[in-house]
């Protein structure tokens, strides 16, 4: 069985594939910012400071950002040379072969689907708080999953269905909405920085590293700066979504690398500044709350700023869902086009130029999951799945440098394979600091994927069928 058959990197990946080429570098950068700035800055910053890192959460963000930078440079090189809308799935198909590509594609489906459903749950909580504040709160049974004593988390389900309609309309329309909402949440963050900068109390930064670099906390849960880095890594999930837009970018070989790197650099700087100010205006011990940024402003007496931050959270989480939902559909589109998932899904609407069957199927499925399942710790699967994808993308750069040295690379990592090697080491190290239960769930999901590959995908692979028709 030729399970390691590879797809050749082809210039056709940058030609017309049926999707609408309408995104420039500006759109792609905002696509990345829309995906990255959300739960991480408004929620995880405080929770990681309170439970893992203390004021040294700044170091956690820096370490996670460095690991992501290595991965981002690898994504940029492969996006400009291999192309395609499949992101790490497509790059693995070219570098390692079909079975590895399937496994990472299966992993990405989990990563993005769980991310959207998890963020929808968080969005629902903030939206319900806003409704309650103006006297229009929903009954409790319509804001909780059945296992939590409710009937359905209605806001979480509805927001996904609304985004589904927006994505069906077209990627250009979705991008415009994303740009507007990104401006709103960046404005919100700017207000927080302006207020916090004049209310810093340096004594809150002492002790700076109360949990050290790494140790074992209550119940065996990892704590410390390194453990914090593996948690706040979730804040960076999303820049890789830019690489799924290759087939809808006007000049993909130039604009996609710009979008990936620019969005990551901008968001990393924002995270460092916000986390430093947040732990400087209040004690890190007071930040283990659902909305630490808004909570810190309330403690300072700036209720108007706290309300503005709540608005920023709602718009911020909306853009995160929109971009991750978009990325999920494009990865499934690429897998379906290759025959590893039923090819019936790889249909592009002639008017909107969007894969409507995939958008509909994903939207309904994620809407039900968000409404009926409290995801809880399942969100940690997002981190380990993303890190696994980053490791393979970095390895992909190394393999293709040796296997296809003459492959045109409009964007090329400097210093040879040094940065991709550092990406493998750093992302792999962050995986080691995640809880064992997360590893067990992750491996169980991959095992299911392996079964599906050998029972369906291998036999229906278009690459395999094409090779079987070639004369001996």
Image (tube, rainbow, N blue to C red):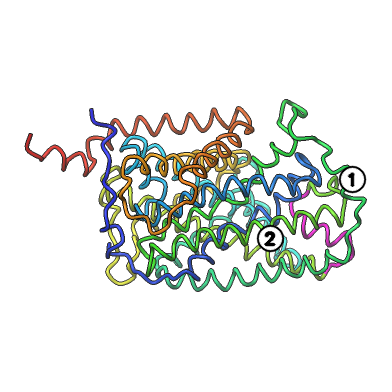
Rendering coords of residue 354 (x, y %): 35, 64
Residue 206's label in the rendered image is 1
Towards the viewer: 46 or 163: 46
Rendering coords of residue 58 (x, y %): 74, 49
Question: Under tag 2, what secondary structure?
Answer: helix
- Please report the residue visible at 59 percent of the width from the left and 34 percent of the height from the top: 429
Left or right: residue 306 compared with residue 98: right
Relative to 112, say whether 449 is above or below: above
Relative to 201, say whether 220 is above or below: above
Residue 290 in the magenta stretch? The answer is yes
Q: What is the distance, in whole Å, between disc 1 and disc 2 at their CAs?
A: 22 Å
- Give the overall secondary structure of the magenta segment: helix
Towards the viewer: 6 or 238: 6
Q: Earlier in the sequence, mark 1 or mark 2?
A: 1
Is residue 134 visible in the rendered image? The answer is no
Relative to 430, say whether 331 is above or below: below
Residue 119 in the magenta stretch? The answer is no
Indicate the quadrant containing the N terminus: top left, top right, bottom left or bottom right. top left
Towards the viewer: 159 or 294: 294
Is residue 222 visible in the rendered image? The answer is yes
- Please report the residue visible at 51 percent of the width from the left and 42 percent of the height from the top: 418
Question: Under tag 1, what secondary structure?
Answer: loop
Q: Which residues are magenta?
A: 289-303
């Amino acid at each position: 069985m030729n399970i390691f058959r590879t797809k050749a990197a082809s210039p056709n990946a940058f030609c017309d594939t049926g999707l609408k080429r309408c995104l420039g570098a500006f759109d792609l950068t905002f696509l990345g910012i829309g995906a990255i700035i959300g739960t991480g800055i408004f929620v995880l910053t405080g929770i990681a400071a309170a439970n893992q890192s203390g004021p040294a959460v700044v170091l956690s963000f820096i370490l996670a950002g460095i690991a992501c930078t290595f991965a981002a440079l690898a994504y940029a090189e492969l996006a400009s040379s291999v192309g395609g809308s499949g992101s790490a799935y497509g790059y693995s198909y070219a570098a390692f072969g079909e079975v590895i590509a399937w496994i990472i594609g299966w992993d990405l489906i989990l990563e993005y689907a769980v991310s959207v459903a998890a963020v929808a749950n968080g969005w629902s909580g903030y939206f319900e708080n806003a409704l309650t504040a103006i006297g229009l709160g929903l009954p409790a049974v319509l804001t909780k999953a059945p296992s939590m004593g409710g009937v359905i988390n209605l806001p979480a389900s509805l927001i996904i269905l609304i985004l589904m309609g927006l994505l069906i309309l077209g990627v250009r329309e979705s991008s415009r909405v994303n740009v507007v909402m990104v401006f709103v949440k960046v404005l919100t963050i700017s207000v927080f920085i302006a207020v916090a900068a004049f209310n810093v109390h340096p004594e809150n930064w002492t002790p700076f590293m109360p949990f050290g670099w790494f140790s074992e906390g209550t119940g065996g849960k990892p704590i410390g700066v390194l453990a914090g880095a593996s948690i706040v890594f979730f804040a960076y999930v999303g820049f890789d979504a830019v690489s799924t837009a290759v087939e809808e970018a006007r000049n993909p070989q130039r604009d996609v690398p710009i979008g990936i790197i620019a969005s990551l650099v901008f968001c990393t700087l924002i995270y460092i500044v916000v986390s430093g100010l947040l732990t400087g205006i209040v004690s890190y011990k007071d930040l283990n709350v659902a909305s630490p940024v808004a909570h810190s402003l309330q403690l300072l007496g700036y209720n108007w700023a706290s309300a503005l931050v709540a608005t920023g959270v709602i718009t911020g989480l909306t853009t995160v869902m929109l971009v991750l939902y978009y990325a999920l559909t494009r990865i499934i589109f690429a897998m379906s086009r290759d025959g590893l998932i039923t090819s019936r899904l790889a249909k592009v609407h002639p008017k909107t130029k969007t894969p409507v069957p995939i958008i509909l199927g994903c939207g309904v499925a994620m809407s039900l999951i968000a409404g009926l399942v409290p995801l809880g710790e399942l969100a940690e699967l997002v981190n380990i799945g993303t890190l696994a994808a980053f490791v393979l993308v970095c390895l992909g750069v190394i393999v293709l440098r040796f296997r296809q040295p003459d492959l045109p690379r409009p964007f090329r990592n400097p210093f040879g394979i040094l940065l991709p090697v550092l990406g493998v080491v750093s992302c792999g190290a962050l995986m080691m600091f995640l809880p064992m239960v997360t590893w067990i769930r992750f491996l169980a999901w991959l095992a299911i994927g392996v079964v599906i590959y050998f029972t369906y995908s291998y036999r229906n692979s278009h690459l395999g069928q094409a090779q079987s028709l070639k004369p001996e």
